[in-house]
Amino acid sequence: MNFPLEHLENFTKNILLKIGCPENDAEVATKVLLSADLRGVDSHGVARLSGYVRLWEAKRINPTPSIRIVHESPSTAVVDGDGGLGLVVAPHAMNVAITKAKTAGTGWVSVKNSNHYGIAGIHAMQALQHDMVGISLTNASPLVSPTFSKERLLGTNPIAVAIPADKEPPFVLDMATTTAANGKLEILQRKGMEAPLGWIQDKDGQPTNNPYGVKEGGALLPLGGDREHGSHKGYGLGAIVDIFSAVFSGANYGPWVPPFVAFLEPDPNPVGEGLGHFFGAMRMDAFRPADEFKSHMDNWIRRFRSAQPVPGQDKVLIPGDPERELESERKLNGIPILAPVVEDLKALGKKLGVSW
C-alpha cells in the first residue's frame, strides 16, 4: 500500500517529538529518514523508526544532544555527537565540513559518539547546493566477516559521493561495501524470499541463501562475495571506512561498534565512544572554475549515459539515476510500505500516543 509523503512525515516527526527531540531536530531527522524511502532505500527509511525508539528506550540515544567540535584545524574537525540520533548528528557534522571548505577549500570531519545516520547519500548531497563535492562514510553494527574469516568484525560501512553537474542531474554514488546491506535481508524476510548466494555465509563460514543466516550466527559478506570474485576489495573498502570514521575520531571500531538492535548490548569494554562517521566537502573552484568543472561533468555524464548497452538492457545508468527516478515517482504517487512495517508503525504509534 502507498502512503503520501506528508502522512509519513507527520507521523515520524510526532514520534520523534514524543521521545523528546526538539522541534528542529525532529524535522531534520524526519527529512533524513524519509529521504531513504523516497529514493527507494526502503530498508533505511520509516521501517527503522521503531529501531531508533527501542534504542531510546534502552537509554542508548540522547534525544537532546549537545553536539560540539572537540578538536579542529582550519580544514578538519572532530565532532562529538553526545549520543544523539545519527539522523541529527550527521547533518550537523556535514555542515561543519562545508563551512570549513568555504574558507579552506576542503573540509574534513570525523565524528564520534553518534548512532545510525540513515542513508549515506543524503548527507553527501548536502554539499551540492554549495558547488561542492560531498563525501559521507559511516561504520555500522559488526555483521560482516573479513575475507577468509568466520568472525563478524565490520559493518556494511557505506561510501557515498555526490558530485555537482550543470544541466545534468548530479552524480550520486551511495553503496555499501558489502554485497548487500543488512536491510535487504530484512526485506527478504518480510517477503518470505531467499537470499541470493554470495550475500551471506552461515555460522560455519559456508555460503547460504537463508535470509535469517546472519541472525543464526552467520555473517554478511564483503562486496564481491568470495575471494575469487574480489571480496578482499570489499573488505579493504569497509576497513577504510571503519578507520576514517572511528580510528580518526575516537569512536568504536571493528567488533566494538555498538549494534543497532536494542536487544544486543554494546561491548562492555569499548575502545571508543559510540558510532563513527566521516564527512568531506571539496569546493570545485579549489581545483578549477566551478562552471567549467560542471560543464565537463555534464559532458562526462552524457558520454557514459550514451554508452552502447548490452543486449536486453535499454540504457546505461549513472550513479543516482534509479534513486532520482524513484523519488520523482514516489513524491507523486506515494511511498509503498510493506504490510508488516505498517503494523509495526501502528503499534509504535499506539504505544506512544501518536495517531497513525
Image: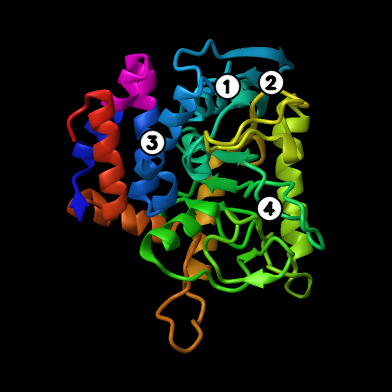
Q: CA distance from mark 1 to mark 3?
A: 29 Å
Q: Give the magenta-colored segment's residue range.
A: 14-28
The disc placed on residue 79 is none
First in sequence: mark 1 vs mark 3: 3
User: Given this view, does label 1 or label 3 mark the residue nearer the observer?
Assistant: 3
* Residue 118, x across and y down, in percent: 48, 39
Please report whichever mark, 1 or 2, sits nearer to the chain's N-terminal start: 2
Q: Picture coordinates of residue 263 (x, y %)?
A: 53, 35
**Three-letter residue code for mark 2:** Ala
Q: Total number of numbered labels?
A: 4
Which residue is labeled 4 in the image?
A: 144
Crowding around mark 1 (Cα neighbors within 10 Å: few <14, some 14 to 19, many 20+) is many
Residue contact at pointers 4 and 3, CB within 8 angstroms: no
* Residue 117 lies within the magenta run: no
Q: Quadrant of residue 247?
A: top right
The local crowd at label 3, few if under 14, some if 14 to 19, many if 20 or more residues have their Cα within 10 Å, is some
Look at the image and tell me whether residue 77 can be seen.
yes
Residue under label 1: 96
Element type where label 2 sits in the image: strand
In this image, 182 relative to 37: left or right? Answer: right
Q: What separation in Å lies between label 4 and label 1 (alpha carbons)?
A: 30 Å
Residue that label 3 marks: 50
- Residue under pointer 2: 77
Q: Secondary structure at mark 3?
A: helix
Disc 1 is placed on an element classified as helix
The image shows residue 133, relative to residue 314, as above or below, that is above
